[in-house]
Image (cartoon, rainbow, N blue to C red):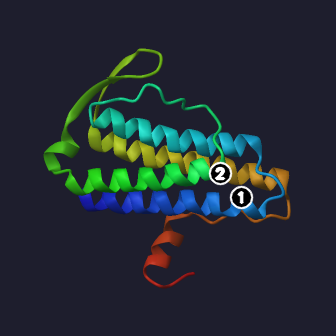
Amino acid sequence: MKEYLLRLYEYNHWANLKHLDCWPRLPQVPARAQLLMSHVLVAQKLWLSRIQGNPDLSLHIWESRSLPDLLALAEANHQSWRTYLQAADAAELARTMTYQNFQKITYTNVVQDIVIHTANHATYHRAQMAQLYRQAYPDFTPPNTDFITFARQLSGQAV
């Protein structure tokens, strides 16, 4: 499971950067796309802080951030998640944790399920961003962030 999660988070970072890297080619980033990317990256930071037992409740998961801030956050998240996942053993990934969401509702989940959730959550919102780019700029081709494209690039089959 650990190797799968490490690969999933490498993919997650690659896909996030694909979106952020395309923004300078847009006449203007759709405001909703910028908000969604901000949400994705802040949520990933928040989830890791929850997993590590020190939830950062000062984070605003629905606050738009600038491109430089998002690039820095993407890199910091990537390093933090990689460090955490490399150190995590099977017991850590299978650990059950209890936390509260922003509505103060208490939930209990297995850590590896939360890790998978954060990557899937990002994929969902990146698809929404691609749709927003297409709607705003019909001639613009959004980045291809399919996992298989990532896998092909890793194996040297695609650029």
**Could you tell me how many numbered marks the image carries?**
2
Q: In the rendered view, does 102 fall on the left or right side of 158? A: left
Give the quarter of the figure containing the C terminus: bottom right
Which residue was labeled with disc 1?
23
Look at the numbered discs 1 and 2 and tell me whether their residues touch, using CB distance below 8 Å.
yes
Q: Which residue position is annotated with label 2? A: 67
Describe residue 69's horizontal placement relative to residue 74 as left or right.
right
Q: Secondary structure at mark 1?
A: helix
Q: Tag 2: residue type?
A: Leu
The type of residue carrying mark 1 is Trp
Q: Quadrant of residue 65?
A: top right
Question: x%, y% of residue 66?
Answer: 66, 46
Residue 139: mark: none
For image coordinates 35% across by 29% down, the residue present is: 55
In the orientation shown, which residue stands out farthest toward the top?
A: 104
Quarter of the image where the N terminus is located: bottom left
Q: Position of residue 149 (x, y in %)?
A: 53, 71
**Residue 45, picture quadrant:** top left
* x then y, percent, for residue 111: 28, 39
In x, y percent, where is residue 60? 54, 29
Mark 2 is surrounded, within 10 Å at the Cα level, by few (under 14), some (14 to 19) or many (20 or more) other residues, namely some
Circle 2: element type: helix
From this view, report whether residue 49 is shown above or below residue 81: above
| Viewer-closest of 76 and 130 | 76
Q: Residue at x 50, y 84 (%)?
A: 157
Label 1: few (<14), some (14–19) or many (≥20) C-alpha neighbours in 10 Å: some
In the visual, does 122 lie left or right of 36? left
Residue at x-position 49% and y-position 30%: 59
The tag earlier along the polypeptide, 1 or 2, is: 1
